[in-house]
């Protein structure tokens, strides 16, 4: 555990503001379309992911874990990263699946439909999130140390316990059960519904990570959640859906000439 003098220096307002500015700058650079558009640098996307993982881990510690300075967890930053993967995958799958509803795919394709692979990907991230969240709870519960259980007390001994139960159902059990069936994964409309549901549950998980650490007995923080969701939802109206539809391969009942030549 870091010494109190180091904590005071690391969490001083000026130093935190400087680090947050650096985090925002790095995220902006990584999010630029030109950052990963070059096909000549195949490893750029992998390097960007590593940079994002490092920066986001530090940001999770500075902005979320520091809300309870006496509490720390070595797996918290990884849990936040996997939560981002769940949200990003759910949003991408929902947009792509909705854009592909009007696509006429072949009646009997030689390979499994792409929607099944997307559903399996979302299944994997949900399972990873549940594993990390459960292992963090199990380890802290087994050790039962005051400085560690301080994070769970406002989440399990207040009205937030209902939110925790909702997360177990909506962010893990129900979508995981639905994604076990090919009848759900192979149909884009059903897969899009599951992805949107997971995205909503992930927003609830964000509230679970932040609000109880600030004011566990107050409802004042909840009025910010709809505004946050509306701001994030603006991505859907910024051309994201059109670009996903344009990127979705359109196939009709008559295969292209290139595919006919290949089949011959």
Image (cartoon, helix red, strand yellow):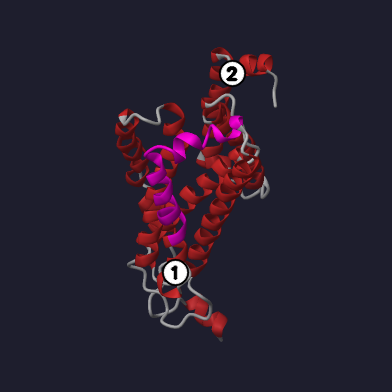
Question: Is label 2 in contact with label 1 (beta carbons under 8 Å)?
Answer: no
Going 38% across and 75% down the picture, which residue do you hit? 252
Query: Is residue 25 in view from this perspective?
Result: no
Q: Is residue 208 left or right of residue 78?
A: left
Q: Which quarter of the rendered picture does the C terminus lie within?
A: bottom right
Give coordinates of residue 144: x percent, y percent. Answer: 61, 38
User: Label 2's element?
Assistant: loop
User: Is 159 part of what is drawn in magenta?
Assistant: yes
Within 10 Å of disc 2 (Cα), the crowding (few <14, some 14-19, many 20+) is some
Q: Quadrant of residue 1?
A: top right
Q: Which residue is mark 2?
A: 11
Going 36% across and 69% down the picture, which residue do you hit? 103
Of residue 193 and residue 28, the one placed in the foreground of this image is: 193
Q: Which residue is mark 1?
A: 185
Q: Which residues are magenta?
A: 146-173
Disc nearest the viewer among 2 and 1: 2
Q: Is residue 32 above or below residue 188?
A: above
Q: Which mark is residue 107?
A: none
Query: Is residue 171 in view from this perspective?
Result: yes
Of residue 126 and residue 256, the one placed in the foreground of this image is: 126
- Name the main secondary structure of what is drawn in magenta: helix
Dot 2 or dot 1, earlier in sequence = 2
Q: Is residue 69 above or below residue 82?
A: above
Give coordinates of residue 96: x percent, y percent. Answer: 41, 58
Q: Quadrant of residue 147?
A: top right
Q: Is residue 204 above or below residue 108?
A: above
Going 41% across and 57% down the picture, which residue do you hit? 195
Going 37% across and 43% down the picture, which residue do you hit? 235
């Amino acid at each position: 555990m870091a010494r109190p003098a180091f904590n005071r220096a690391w969490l001083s307002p000026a130093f935190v503001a400087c680090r947050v500015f650096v985090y925002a700058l790095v995220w902006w650079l990584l999010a630029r379309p030109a950052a990963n558009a070059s096909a000549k640098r195949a490893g750029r996307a992998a390097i960007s992911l590593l940079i994002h993982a490092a920066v986001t881990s530090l940001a999770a510690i500075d902005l979320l874990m520091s809300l309870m300075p006496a509490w720390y967890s070595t797996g918290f930053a990884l849990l936040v990263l996997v939560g981002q993967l769940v949200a990003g995958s759910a949003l991408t799958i929902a947009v792509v699946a909705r854009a592909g509803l009007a696509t006429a795919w072949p009646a009997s394709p030689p390979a499994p439909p792409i929607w099944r692979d997307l559903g399996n990907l979302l299944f994997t991230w949900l399972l990873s999130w549940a594993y990390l969240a459960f292992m963090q709870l199990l380890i802290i519960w087994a050790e039962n140390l005051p400085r560690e259980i301080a994070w769970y007390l406002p989440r399990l001994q207040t009205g937030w316990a209902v939110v925790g139960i909702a997360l177990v159902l909506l962010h893990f059990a129900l979508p995981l059960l639905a994604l076990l069936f090919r009848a759900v994964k192979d149909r884009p409309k059903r897969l899009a519904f599951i992805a949107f549901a997971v995205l909503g549950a992930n927003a609830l998980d964000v509230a679970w990570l932040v609000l109880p650490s600030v004011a566990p007995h107050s409802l004042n923080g909840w009025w910010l959640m709809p505004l946050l969701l509306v701001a994030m939802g603006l991505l859907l109206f910024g051309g994201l859906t059109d670009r996903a539809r344009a990127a979705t391969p359109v196939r009709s009942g008559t295969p292209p000439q290139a595919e006919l030549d290949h089949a011959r």
